[in-house]
Image: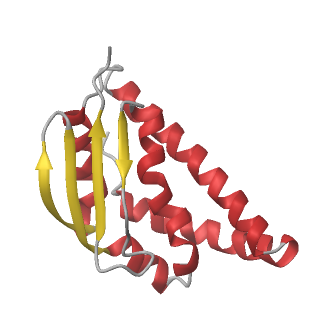
Amino acid sequence: MSEIPTLTKRRLQAQVIGPIFAEMVAQIGEEKASAILDAAIRKAAIAEGKYFAEREGGQTSMSSFVKLYELWTADGALEMKVLRADEEAFDFDITRCRYAETYKEMGLGKVGHLLSCNRDGTFCEGYDPAITLERKQTIMEGAPCCTFRYRYAAKG
């Protein structure tokens, strides 16, 4: 079974989430609505990470994690410059993000970071907690590039 490209999946999700989020804002305010959306998306990212870890038979590694990036970059969703990819680190910069472009086109640019960016590090909690992400900036929030710096802490 092949996976739906992640950009397509996020667009479909946003088509449903957008109107729900707008209604939540109208009823309970933007701050509370954003907090609820943030919590829900983070929980979904952890669950998705667990799903992909199960597909690896629980034998996750940095190299299996790097391979997953094929899903996130499918259909030209991300243009990236890989700086380092080995068993301890996966460092890259995103120079074009079609996720950000898609959310902006859909009128959801203001919450795009909640819909996508917050998933990146949180996904690891479900996939392999030994993998952590440090990111100082994102295109979604107006920077010229996203700086992804994943680290793998040896299990033991």
Quadrant of the drawing holding the N terminus: top left
Residue 152, percent from left and from top: 28, 34
The quarter of the displayed image where residue 95 is located: bottom left
Residue 154, percent from left and from top: 27, 24
**Taking 35 as reference, is 69 above or below it?**
above
Residue 109, percent from left and from top: 52, 80
In this view, the residue in front, 91 or 109, is 91
Is residue 34 rendered to the left or right of residue 80? right
Is residue 20 rendered to the left or right of residue 48? right
Q: Residue furthest right?
A: 27
Quadrant of the drawing holding the C terminus: top left
The quarter of the displayed image where residue 20 is located: bottom right
Q: Residue at x 28, y 40 (%)?
A: 151
Colour setting: secondary structure
Is residue 60 rendered to the left or right of residue 83? right
**Taking 6 as reference, is 20 above or below it?**
below
Residue 43, percent from left and from top: 60, 44
Q: Residue at x 48, y 77 (%)?
A: 103
Is residue 144 rendered to the left or right of residue 13? left
What count of labels does the image hold?
Answer: 0
In this view, the residue in front, 136 or 54, is 136
